[in-house]
Image (tube, coloured by chain):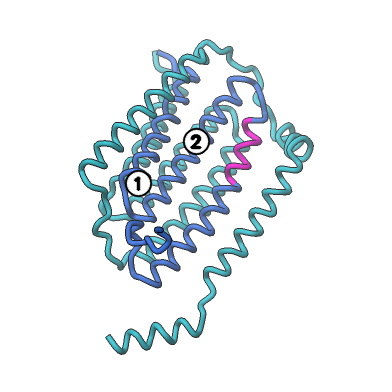
Amino acid sequence: MTVALSDYLVVSALLFGIGAAGVLMRRNALVMFMCIELMLNAANLALVTFARVLHDVGGQATVFFVLVVAAAEVTVGLGIVVAIFRKRNSAVVDDLHELQG
Amino acid sequence: MVDATDAAFVALAIVSVGGAIAALEAKEIIYGAVGLAASFFGVASLFFLLDSPFVAVFQITVYVGAVAVLVLFTVMLVREGRWFGDSVGPTASVAGLITVAALVISLVSSFFAAGLSNASEQASAPSFVDIGKLLTGQFAPVLEILALVLAASVLGALTLAKVDPGAKAQAANERERS
């Protein structure tokens, strides 16, 4: 049995599924954050695999854009988590309902 | 017959998926953060197997070097608080699992429907020169906008980190009163 390129896509789909499960089923802001990173990572893996299959450098270039967006998101997001935590000593997203109509 | 690349793929796939599951399920959140770093590292190593060493190195620098370390720092800053009420209820859990299963099945089936498994192997990997040309040529506007996004995110993080002295004094007053 040899590993085909589609097996990389299966790993990517699994990682994305795990990330989606975390966002849907956990209520801790930090864990949800980590799971969003997992999903971005899975998308990167799919991009690189498609770039390899289709002989196109564009997929690899797009990975850099995803990296930049992930870095920006982490900077602001973790800052928000720490700020919220300093204020109310909790990082459970269900407690944050001030903006609810 | 299992050759070295296949064995490496299986091992790295186990590391990535296992690390991701650890990040999701770990009771102590700091082990989850370490599992997340392991998962990032596994995916970066998969990039090496896909003949994309340049992207792989950047993945390690940004994800393992910056994102995972930032997450670890935040876990250490935030760990003391209460974590109960963390999971959703059983009904929502089952609904979430069904949604995720449907998502993974549809992703995998569409990947296989694309017929990529028969795609020809590539002779030479694209070099970082090609990536650089693309980034500074066709994708140059995107690159500039992303630079602005990064600058804005740094400003946002600085604003969030700024401690308002008035708010601090008020918090101290409230703590004394209670």
Q: Is residue B93 visible?
A: yes
Q: Residue B161 location, x and y as percent?
A: 52, 70
Q: Residue at 69% across / 54% down in the picture?
A: B148
Q: Residue at 26% across / 42% down in the picture?
A: B92
Amino acid type at mark 1:
Ala
Disc 1 marks which residue?
B23
Callout 1 crowding tier (Cα within 10 Å): few <14, some 14–19, many ≥20 = many
Q: Is residue B4 visible?
A: no
Disc 2 marks which residue?
B45
- Which image quadrant for residue A22? top left
The stretch in magenta equals A59-67
> Main structural element of the magenta stretch: helix, strand or loop?
helix
Task: Tell me which label, 2 or 1, sits earlier in the chain.
Answer: 1
Q: Secondary structure at mark 2?
A: helix
Q: Residue B15 location, x and y as percent?
A: 38, 37
The chain assigned the colour blue in the figure is A
Residue B9 falls left or right of residue B121: left
User: Is the Cβ of the residue at disc 2 closer than 8 Å to that at disc 1?
Assistant: no
Q: Residue B155 location, x and y as percent?
A: 62, 64
Residue A52 falls left or right of residue B77: right
The chain assigned the colour cyan in the figure is B
Q: Which quadrant holds the C terminus of chain B?
A: bottom left
Mark 2–mark 1 Cα distance, whole angstroms, equals 18 Å
